Amino acid sequence: MLLSTLITLTSPAKHITLLRLCKHCIRTVTERSVHHLVAAKGASHREYRGHKCTSVSGGCQRSSDFQWKRHHSADHGQVRVRFAPSPTGFLHLGGLRTALYNYLFAKKYGGSFILRMEDTDQSRLVPGAADAIEDMLEWAGIPPDESPRRGGPCGPYLQSQRLDGYVEAAQALVETGHAYLCFCSTQRLELLKKGALRSGETPRYDNRCRHLHPDQRAERLSRGDPHVVRFRLDPGVEPFQDLVFGRNRHEVSEVEGDPVLMKGDGFPTYHLANVVDDHRMGVTHVLRGAEWLISTSKHLLMYRALGWQPPTFGHLPLLMNRDGSKLSKRQGDIFIQSFAHKGALPEALLDMVTNCGSGFEWGNRTGRKLDELVAEFNESKITTHSALLDLDKLPEFNRIHLLHRIGDVERCRHLVEELREHIRQTFGPQVQEQDVLKEDYIQRVLHLRKGHISSLRELVTPTYAYLWIRPSVSRQHLEEVTSEAQTIAALVLQLMEADRGNALTTEGLSSELKAVAKKVKSTKYSSVMKLLRLALSGQQQGPSVAEMMVSLGNGETCQRLQRVLQH
């Protein structure tokens, strides 16, 4: 089990950190250990030949057996950021926003966006959640460059498949005195917790096993006593500069007990795993939720203990409900799959979760597309204030972005296919006229309704059923509006006959319908429109009569008016 250490070489172009991994030696390789590197003369930042892992024990003398990986510094090399969710649930709005900010940061600086699954809490894993998270990132239009599905140079991207690296790091920390084995039972830890709560104190480990004599530790190990590995929290935390919250420092040793690094089941805790993986994957910037801000000093202590250069940290303010309450997974309606199922557009969700926050040039404006979000993103403008999310505004965001899609020829074609499928699923054999499933007809409907609808699904609700199936309207209903129903129908049929072959427009028809109404003896214009709307749609409300006629087209409009004459 091997541990990486660092050698930094300087070239005129950039600083490159090399991760040293001996493939053969099972001993820890750190500056403080008995191992060291012997580099061949003339080795450059492009050529690493003849390196030896030389142990005083003579156990490893192999040459050219080091695996090298580059880690470019944040200032001089490629930006690498990661989104590292736990597949103990599905992607929700808070996670989408964190992923989006990482994606925007990577794309702004021409870097890489990594998806890493932190699946070390095996007892809470939800089957299918890991795949679903990646599915939703792809659906949202922010696919990772490296991931469990796509692979990449720093895989595997599931933490459960990277256990050797955590064991190596824990072993190195134990050997250098920065960590120790803890044999405290769960019963003892529970008693400590209850005692602290009774005293009104915050529960914390009392660091008892920190002081075990080596002989005591050896005896416990020989008996096979269960144990974990804990990190020694020493005072003297150095301040760090957060991209969002500025200068920060938390003296964690004063408020916390020594944290667990490796659990009894052989899996690491978040604290160790994220440090090891961020380092080995060459992550240059960590953008994560503000709830992790207080843990960063602890993580920086680990970086220092391992002799690693930490990434730059930026903690994003939380996404909250509009009343300031916590956005909870238990709400049920904040999961991205739920929004997608209900017809929300991915760009509408991205627009909404950024519009309520900060981090963009020229403030917040509605209707930004992804390329505009990338262009306008500015991490220096992210404020520390929580972002208050108003889900009631989603229909308006969806309306705006649906309008954009309809206006784009290629994307409108996809909308036609999607709407056609909704029509078939909703109305099935009720569709009598197959022309309503043709592309030109559906496109005409979309262009006439753009700006008025928030979702494609609205077009298959009862309000718009007349577009796809012929309504059934009784003579009694027509006569309740006016006794001149047949006269009005005949006049409009004459109008449509005169317009046959000409392109119908709502403006032209509106003017012509007003002229028709003047020819009717005792029916007001409003009642004429009411009659025509009822005859064409079976509805008493809806779009203008002129728009209905344009949507249906000349032939279908005449078919429906002929039925009035037949009553």
Image (tube, rainbow, N blue to C red):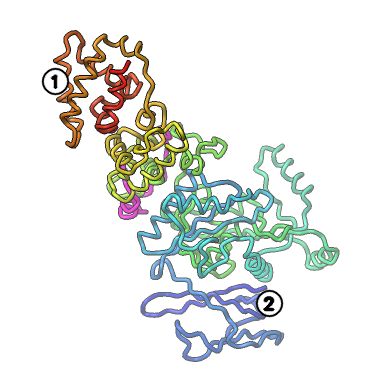
Sequence-wise first label, 2 or 1: 2
The Cα–Cα distance between marks 2 and 1, rounded to whole angstroms, is: 95 Å
Quarter of the image for residue 220 reads bottom right
Answer with the quarter of the image where residue 277 lies: bottom right
Q: Position of residue 401 (x, y in %)?
A: 33, 42
Q: In this rendering, is residue 200 above or below 252? A: above
Left or right of residue 256, residue 379 in this image: left
Magenta region: 365-393
Q: Residue at x 41, y 30 (%)?
A: 461
Q: Nearer the viewer, mark 2 or mark 1?
A: 1
Amino acid type, mark 1: Ala
Image location of residue 222, percent across then percent down: 84, 67
Q: Residues within 10 Å of mark 2 (few under 14, many from 20)?
A: many
Which residue type carries mark 2? Arg
User: What is the quadrant of the N terminus in the image?
Assistant: bottom right
Is residue 380 found inside the magenta-colored segment of the image?
Answer: yes
> In the rendered image, which residue does mark 1 sit on?
515
What residue is pinned by disc 2? 27
